[in-house]
Image (cartoon, rainbow, N blue to C red):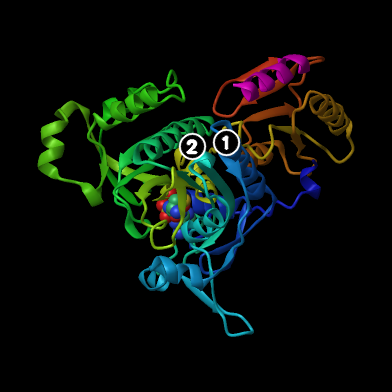
Amino acid sequence: MYFSKSFIPILKNNPTEAKIKSHQLMLRVGMIKQSSAGIYSWLPLGFKVMKKIEQIVREEQDRVGVQEILMPTIQSSEIWKESGRYDDYGEEMLRIKDRQNREMLYGPTNEELITEIFRSSIKSYKSLPQLLYHIQWKFRDELRPRFGIMRCREFYMKDAYSFDLSDEDAFFSYNKFFLSYLKTFKRLNLSAIPMAADTGPIGGNLSHEFIILAETGENKIYTDKRIFDVDYTSTILENSSLEKLRRDYEKFYSVTDEKFNKAEFENKVPTEHRVNTKGIEVGHIFYFGDKYSKPMNASVDFNGKKEFVKMGSYGIGVSRLVGAIIEAKYNDKDEIMKWPISVSPYDCAIIPMISKNDSSNLEKSNKILDYLKSKNIDPIIDDTDENISAKIKKFNLIGIPYQLIIGKKTEGELFEFKEVGEQTQKLKIEEIASQINKAKSN
Ligand code: 5CA
């Protein structure tokens, strides 16, 4: 890709309307554009990052046996009346009437719709468990949309739903998601802490939020440093192993302010391990038993007996994660962003010094581009006539983790190569390709 042909509308300065760094940066480097309050268009740079996050989320769901489907954004009010949530959900639900005067709504979540899909097809306990997910836009008419795509009205969410015969089986499903979330966030280079949480309008009495630490987060959190050392890597998809994992986390006091109790915090966490900071909720899982299956009559036949299925739901804020990664990775002081290579919009920026009457560096860049592409690396060339330091500054903001600079210091076969935030190295193109590919395979 050539920078001059790409749609990356960079702003000279930070937009004044944005209060937190992710919102500032996303507007500054043209990742998103607001279309109305809390509703955004995703421009190529932002969209590429979000699609890569989505793909990682998808792969980790598939890995634990969750099946992908796609439900619509617009739902009928009928099923919400059956569950009793049509009135309960309140003003956050965007209600619409179609031309037949039927009450419709833009889905804020999908417990009702998935229950309706399940009950119309699954009749026997032998078909359980069923684990289903989709990745789809949601709409919540937030009273105060803010911080760009972090708390907006239209957002992209992965929501999964589990159906089991008994509480015990359902906890197994719940714990599978618990482990799979830790792995998903790890692949995004984030360290997310699972925390006991309130269930709000989704309901139920078992719930964990997955929170990443960030000064600008909206959730106050109280936790124990030692929770970061819990090792989940040896956990296997087997009941007792998964149960142990959840218990290992639950040993440590770790809550958001909704559940905070000062005396309990001080009692359970020795002073030197206390962490009192802020965080961003990137995922939330719920177990709510028959809260939806009972009123909506979703049951299976179990040896001649009718059993209401036990359900859970499991969300990840796919679009919010784009902002959350910026909050976690952006270095405010030096104005440097570095995307984890797993989600970076491009793998490498080729930055040639170009003067009016000498195009040799651009020609070299084209050859490098072809070579890197042949090694499955996705580069972008800055073919504009800006000076080299302006180009580097721009790419420091865009956050592509590797920069290959072709200028005065290029010597024969050796190129100036830099991992953002690290020292410049002089390397052969083959060494550069293998360094990038090594990072990509991690
Ligand atoms: N049905 C359940 C689980 S699938 C559910 O809706 N859970 S939720 O309300 O917690 O949302 C799941 C995730 O979506 C949250 O953890 C958060 O990361 C993201 N999210 C929720 N509201 C917003 C919003 N207004 N803007 C951006 N992301 C949001």
SS of the residue at dot 2? helix
Q: Nearer the viewer, residue 180 or 349?
A: 180
Q: Residue at x 85, y 33 (%)?
A: 362
Please state the extent of the stretch shown in magenta in the rendering: 427-442
Is residue 432 part of the magenta span, yes or no? yes
Mark 2: give few (<14), some (14-19) or many (20+) Cα within 10 Å.
some
SS of the residue at dot 1? loop
Q: Is residue 29 visible?
A: yes
Residue of label 1: 339
Residue of label 2: 329
Q: Residue at x 36, y 60 (%)?
A: 201
Q: Which mark is residue 389?
A: none
Residue 337 image offset from top left, x and y in percent: 54, 38
Mark 1 and 2 residues: CB-CB less than 8 Å, in contact?
A: yes
Residue 13 image offset from top left, x and y in percent: 56, 54
> Which of the two labelled residues, at mark 1 and mark 2, occupies the earlier sequence position?
2
Q: Nearer the viewer, residue 195 or 362?
A: 195
Q: Amino acid at mark 2?
A: Lys
- Which quadrant does the C terminus fall into? top right
Is residue 349 part of the magenta span, yes or no? no
Q: Amino acid at mark 1?
A: Trp
Residue 93 image offset from top left, x and y in percent: 46, 70
Q: Residue at x 13, y 39 (%)?
A: 264
Query: From the Cβ of disc 1, is ligand 1 less than 8 Å away?
Result: no
What main secondary structure does the magenta stretch of the protein show?
Answer: helix
Mark 1: give few (<14), some (14-19) or many (20+) Cα within 10 Å.
many
Q: Is residue 307 above or below residue 173?
A: below
* Spatial CA span between label 1 and label 2: 7 Å
Please tell me how many numbered marks the rendered image carries. Answer: 2
